[in-house]
Image (cartoon, rainbow, N blue to C red):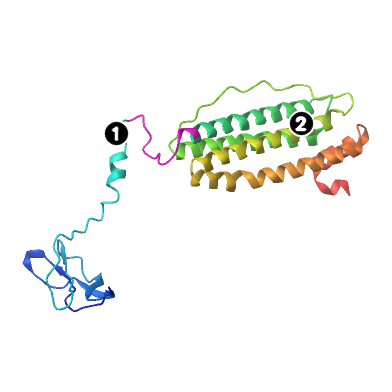
């Protein structure tokens, strides 16, 4: 049936029994003879209202129609924890997602630790490749920043950060055939690809648990940047393979230290 507007449809002020209109008609729908009207409030006075409709010539008020604006949030209200050790912010955040984030935090810290060891190696007085030392120091800070960003997100979603053990990295990066610069940069490339693989795993866990917020967070904050890092380090590996272990390594180091202009 079609709904149509009818003068008999009105929202009335029930304060003190008065039937003064509280709302002005804004729009209406019609289906046969049943009239329904959508109205906009004129004032905020009054304690309630009646909903009336008409069907044909029958202008009797509908009974049993009650407007309850907070009905939808009742089930959420019941889920608000009362215990002090349980997060109030947690919503639709599974234990699997929480554990996967903690695992990724550990990955980022481990990679940061390896980069820090590389910085210490190339900063030695008998190695003295300041460009490589600076590059790996910045890389270490960046990976630690990623770990802290994941920790902040974990707390934001109501999870608990659990830090795992960090493995002791290598302290020597010299290689008989490749030399220290190429060997360290190839190791860095492997670490970046491993980090990307772990991020994709975190994304798949979020997708499997239908956690839209977590998938968006991983995509917007990590994945694109990780691809750029892999591309940049791949180029560094290719360049170091070309220059060999001699003077070319020093020239490459100067490029890292002072920028691309040195390579011209």
- Relative image position of residue 124 (x, y in whole percent): 79, 25
Based on the picture, tell me whether residue 89 belongs to the magenta stretch. yes
- Residue occupying the point 79% across, 37% down: 131
Mark 1 lies on residue? 82
Q: Which one is nearer the viewer's eye here, 226 or 215?
A: 215
- Residue occupying the point 85% across, 40% down: 238
| Residue that extends furthest to the front in the rendered view of this protein | 1
- Residue occupying the point 86% across, 37% down: 240
Give the mark nearer the N terminus: 1 vs 2: 1
Q: Quadrant of the N terminus?
A: bottom left
Residue stretch rendered in magenta on the structure: 84-96
| Inter-mark Cα distance, 1 to 2 | 49 Å
Q: Which one is nearer the viewer's eye here, 23 or 179?
A: 23
Q: Residues within 10 Å of mark 1 (few under 14, many from 20)?
A: few
- Relative image position of residue 77 (x, y in whole percent): 29, 43
- Relative image position of residue 7 (x, y in whole percent): 18, 79
Q: What label sits on residue 187 in the rendered view? A: 2
- Residue occupying the point 45% across, 40% down: 156
In the rendered image, which quarter is residue 109 located in?
A: top right
- Relative image position of residue 54 (x, y in whole percent): 17, 74
Up the image or down, 40 lies above or below 160; here it is: below
Q: Secondary structure at mark 2?
A: helix
| Residue that extends furthest to the left in the rendered view of this protein | 17
Q: Secondary structure at mark 1?
A: loop
Based on the picture, tell me whether residue 26 belongs to the magenta stretch. no
Residue 12 appears left or right of 74 = left
In the rendered image, which quarter is residue 232 located in?
A: top right
Q: What label sits on residue 61 in the rendered view? A: none
Q: Residues within 10 Å of mark 2 (few under 14, many from 20)?
A: some
């Amino acid at each position: 049936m079609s709904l149509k507007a009818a003068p008999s449809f009105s929202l009335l002020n029930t304060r003190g029994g008065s039937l003064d209109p509280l709302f002005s008609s804004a729009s209406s729908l019609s289906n046969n003879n049943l009239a329904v009207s959508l109205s906009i409030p004129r004032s905020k006075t009054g304690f309630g209202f009646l909903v009336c409709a008409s069907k044909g010539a029958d202008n009797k008020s509908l009974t049993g129609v009650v407007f309850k604006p907070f009905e939808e949030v009742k089930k959420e209200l019941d889920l608000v924890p009362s215990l002090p050790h349980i997060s109030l912010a947690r919503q639709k955040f599974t234990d699997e997602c929480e554990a996967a984030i903690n695992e990724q935090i550990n990955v980022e810290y481990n990679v940061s630790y390896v980069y820090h060891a590389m910085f210490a190696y190339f900063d030695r007085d008998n190695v003295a490749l300041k460009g490589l030392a600076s590059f790996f120091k910045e890389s270490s800070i960046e990976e630690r920043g990623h770990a802290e960003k994941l920790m902040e997100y974990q707390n934001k979603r109501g999870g608990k950060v659990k830090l795992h053990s960090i493995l002791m990295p290598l302290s020597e990066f010299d290689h008989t055939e490749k030399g220290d610069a190429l060997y360290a940069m190839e190791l860095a490339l492997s670490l970046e690809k491993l980090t990307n693989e772990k991020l994709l795993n975190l994304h798949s866990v979020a997708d499997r648990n239908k956690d839209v917020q977590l998938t968006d967070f991983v995509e917007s904050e990590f994945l694109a940047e990780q691809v750029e890092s892999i591309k940049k380090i791949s180029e560094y590996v290719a360049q170091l393979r070309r220059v060999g272990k001699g003077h070319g390594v020093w020239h490459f180091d100067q490029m890292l230290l002072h920028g691309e202009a040195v390579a011209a």
